[in-house]
Image (tube, rainbow, N blue to C red):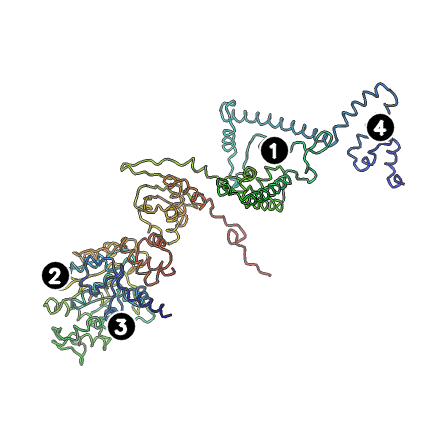
Amino acid sequence: MLSRSCRHLCRRYSQAVTFRTIENSPSQHNEKQEGLFYTMNPDLCKQLFGHGGFPKSFQLQTKTFTETAIMVRRPALDLMNCIRASDMDKPVIRYVLYGEKGTGKSITIAHLLHYVHEEGYLIVHVPWVSEWLRRVPRHKEMSNSQTREGLVDLPLDAAAWLIHFKSQNQTLLKSGDLKISKEYVWSKREKTEAGAPLAALVEHGISRVKYACDVVDAIVDEIKILSTNKLCKTFVAIDGFNSFFYPLTRLNTPTKKKVKPEEVTLTSSFLKLTNNDWSNGAIVVSADQLAVPDDHQESYLPRYLLYKKGFEHLDPFVPIEVGRYNEKEFLSCAEYYRDRLWLRGPPEIETELKFTSACNPYRFMEQCAPL
Amino acid sequence: MYFNSITMSRVIIKQLLPHTKSFCVTFRNPTVSNVFNYSTKVTTTNSNNALENLTDWETLSRKKKISKAMKAYLERSQEHDEFMKRQQFEYNIGKRHLANMMGEDPETFTQKDVDRAIEYLFPSGIYDPAARPLMKPPEEVFPARKAAEFDEAGRPHHFLFYTGKPSYFKLMYDAAENIQQLYNFQDKIIRKKATPDPNGSLNLSSSVWLTKDQLEQVLVETITELEYNNFKLVMQRLVSLPHAYRVKEFIEKYRKPLSSQKFALEIPKPSYDAEGRAFITTYECLRKKARGDVTVIAPGTGKITINGKDITYFEDVQSREQVMFPLIFTEMQDRVDIVCNIEGGGPSGQSGAIRWGIAWGLRSFVDAEMLQKMHVAGLLTRDFRRRERKKPGQPGARKKPTWKKR
């Protein structure tokens, strides 16, 4: 019994292995760590991804493995180098992550979030756009916008996002350096003074859910001004961005009218944010097949997924492909799964798994599950 | 008295006949009754002329040697010969007609041409090839008959004739005797403390026991399931003995080699492309409704192209496994490239067709031992199963409506 628990401990904290790197700070990651796993601090993980950010299956896996281990991969390293090397005075550069289903676009974004958090950026992260536009729970809160005619508000979703925003940028918001530039009047009695901290605006949105969408819009404007004025560096990450450009959403107004994505206030706010009319930041969006319905998933290329409108909106951008595992990454991942007892059996199994999963990270994980 | 018990008619016969030793046989076996009619005749002539009497005895003794059974057999065999001659004649005539019909030379018209002509003139969609029209030489159509098993006096040649299945029981007898001999031999070896013969060994992996039908053909006797099982039992016991190689000849007689040579002969030589890489293209890879062609290129890096896409052409794991199986089995997954074009059917049919195509193409790149293994694993076997049609009156091909009492 003692030896078993000892063995367990050894395994759990085994650092002297080939698939793991002890370098847990993403800013120090370089080509040497490519294909290796690093472990994220659980507290930080909760802070950054407590309200979404990981795909559900990955979230479950972290629970099973009792640790959040992310593989250092080429696209993330490239992006970090790009962000490091880019000139912050110039308009923001937009990066589009694309790739087949299950190749790790969201994980790459998560890795980048960890990186920019360490670098002290202000994080504007939308975990999954389809959550707003395509997922319709039984009681989806919808209301017509008070301030903008003909648009639809999603107050609960906006409030949830504000909480996410708040938890991701705890330290920056607490410091109180970020002041808002103008006065916002919500109603006769409620208003936010010019010069109030950004945190106050966020708090207002959370406590007065009715105004959450307007608050999001205001925050977007303020962030653009703040970062252009070099008060903060801003990192925008939007997963499933192509959902904003798919012709229809699944939402219906109370009058049974189909809602188009551009008729949602959140869409307009985040499209405003992804314009390159501001500087001192970086924008990473992902074009994902899973963000659109099954019958429009023929290709994973951005031109197909973003449609003409989205493509022109983002143009010019830097496309970054997230591919399947290469040989080294696959072996390292298999080693890691073996270490976590996610994969067992004879070593020949890996040849077959490599073939049947076609080196697709998600398929590989799924196929290892019953083994 | 003895005669009182017999019927009236027989009594009359008795009065006509003189007393002979085989009198009782007459009653029991009416088929032989002619003999006695004949013999009565002889006895009557006997009394008339002493000169004729002498010659008659000679013929009688000669005639007597041919038993009734022999006579019947001779008659039957003659009849059969005539029948076969007639059939052969008809077959030859038919063949000439067929040749004329097909506009070919009747002299050089072979059985192969006959088959082709029949297939052309009587196209048949019947599933079972055995049920389709045919024209074969009569010796193939009519089964062989056993030769006479007894001599002219009616005495059987074979010492086991009265078992009813002489060759089968002879086989069993021989097997048992061989076993006994091997036991004795083993005892001798042990007594002498001699080392066993190193080069004496029996290789049974490349052959199998004859099946019941095959054994029946060899023995020219019908045997029951039980008898076949006994045969196998005895032979297995014989084989299991340590010195079984001494009766190798006897054992080999009842074993059939696995048909592996067939594949070795037909394997094509790979051709070479511009880059000097060997490649084999297998056309007509069929399975269910899918058809296509598969090219195996060696040396390669394990790249697979299916209709221009990679293995992700197949969504499900099962189909991918099907494609993978021959490569993994032969351990060639990193040494060859595969290019397939496939159309028709669904994923399982397509992957099955590709699997067969890859295995078929890989024959040129593997050694004989692996080829044997592939054959045993069923990789080189076509799967001819097709979708079974739905039957009227029931919901599916085999599915019957739910039984309801009323």
- Real-space Cα distance between discs 1 and 2? 96 Å
Q: At numbered mark 4, what does the secondary structure look like: helix, strand or loop?
A: helix
Please determine whether, in this image, residue B201 is positioned above or below residue A33: above
The answer to whether residue A144 is seen in the rendering is: no
The mark closer to the camera, 1 or 2, is 1
- Real-space Cα distance between discs 3 and 4? 126 Å
The mark closer to the camera, 4 or 2, is 4
- Residue appearing at x 67%, y 29% in the figure: B77
Please determine whether, in this image, residue B121 is positioned above or below residue B319: above
Q: Amino acid at mark 3?
A: Leu
- Real-space Cα distance between discs 4 and 1? 42 Å
- Real-space Cα distance between discs 4 and 2? 136 Å
Chain letter of the residue beneath label 1 in the structure image: B
Please determine whether, in this image, residue B19 is positioned above or below residue B324: above
Q: Which residue is mark 3?
A: A156
Q: Please tell me which residue lies in front, A208 or B272.
A: B272
Task: Provide residue A58's location: percent of width, then percent of height.
Answer: 30, 64
Numbered label attached to residue A39: none
Task: Provide residue B170's location: percent of width, then percent of height.
Answer: 64, 39
CB contact under 8 Å: marks 3 and 4: no
Q: Which residue is mark 1?
A: B142
Q: At numbered mark 2, what does the secondary structure look like: helix, strand or loop?
A: loop
Using residue B343 as the reference point, say whether residue B121 is left or right of it.
Answer: right
Q: Amino acid at mark 4?
A: Thr
Q: Amino acid at mark 1?
A: Phe
Q: Badge 4: few (under 14), some or many (20 or more) residues near its Cα, within 10 Å?
A: some
CB contact under 8 Å: marks 4 and 1: no
Q: At numbered mark 3, what does the secondary structure look like: helix, strand or loop?
A: helix
The answer to whether residue B229 is seen in the rendering is: yes
